[in-house]
Image (spheres, rainbow, N blue to C red):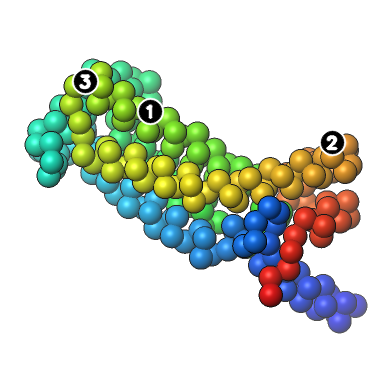
Amino acid sequence: MNSQQTSSHHNQSSTLHAWPQPWDYNPSAWRQRVPLCLLAMVAFFIASYMGLYQWRLIDSAWDPIFDDQTAKVLDSNVSERMRRWFLVPDAIFGAVAYLGDAIFGLAGSTRRWQYRPWMVIIFGIDVIPLGIVSVILVILQGTVVGSWCFLCLVTALISLILIYMAYDEVWSCLLYLHRVWKETHDKRVMWKTFWGIRTPEADSVAESFITLAN
């Protein structure tokens, strides 16, 4: 019994770095996720700094290019309207989202696209749709307010980079879930797979979905 458990554990460990379709690399590998998390933390600190200004915990907002335009954007009617929507300054809302990117980016194994699909999907929702919204809001602030915010532009650029870095893992996870549904048409199997509860049917799909790393 113990030897069987040891063998099973060894087989599972040896395939943690498998490449899911359609890639020739593992998008859940640490070398893929750690740089994303570090970049998200940079954006978190920048957004937190702007949020501190909006809360008036610091007196000014640094901007090496547009002078006082950053302060005008952060104090604008657009930002005030978003504060009423979010109940906190929009920069703080963004900081929380970036922190979520980093936390969910670090959670789970290097095969979490299979073992924790729910986590990858939440990670994708935090990074991709919210990142796109962040970029749109920054553009609207610049065009509607008539001022540009250097730090906002930096965080918008980081959001675009994060989207580029995250989409491959999310895509593999969605393809895997789609393949499980296509092969089984069983809601119970699909639900268990989504929550990371392994089933023989889902494991069989996963075996045909991966290429073992050399």
Image point (59%, 57%), residue name: 27
Return the x and y of residue 41 as percentages of the image width and height: 36, 53
Q: Label 2 amino acid?
A: Lys
Cα–Cα span, label 1 and label 2 = 37 Å
Q: Residue furthest bottom?
A: 3
**Along the viewing direction, whichever of 185 and 143 lies nearer the viewer:** 143
Q: Label 3 amino acid?
A: Val
Q: Looking at the picture, does residue 143 appear above or below residue 172?
A: above
Tell whether 182 sits left or right of 148. right
Q: Earlier in the sequence, mark 1 or mark 2?
A: 1
Q: Quarter holding the C terminus?
A: bottom right
| SS of the residue under disc 3 | helix
Packing grade of label 1 (10 A; few <14, some 14-19, many >=20) is: few
Packing grade of label 3 (10 A; few <14, some 14-19, many >=20) is: some
Q: Looking at the picture, does residue 100 appear above or below residue 78?
A: below
Image point (36%, 46%), residue name: 158
Residue highlighted by disc 3: 145
Cα–Cα span, label 2 and label 3 = 49 Å
Residue highlighted by disc 1: 136
Residue highlighted by disc 2: 187
Return the x and y of residue 7 as percentages of the image width and height: 83, 78
Q: Earlier in the sequence, mark 1 or mark 3?
A: 1
Image point (42%, 30%), residue name: 133
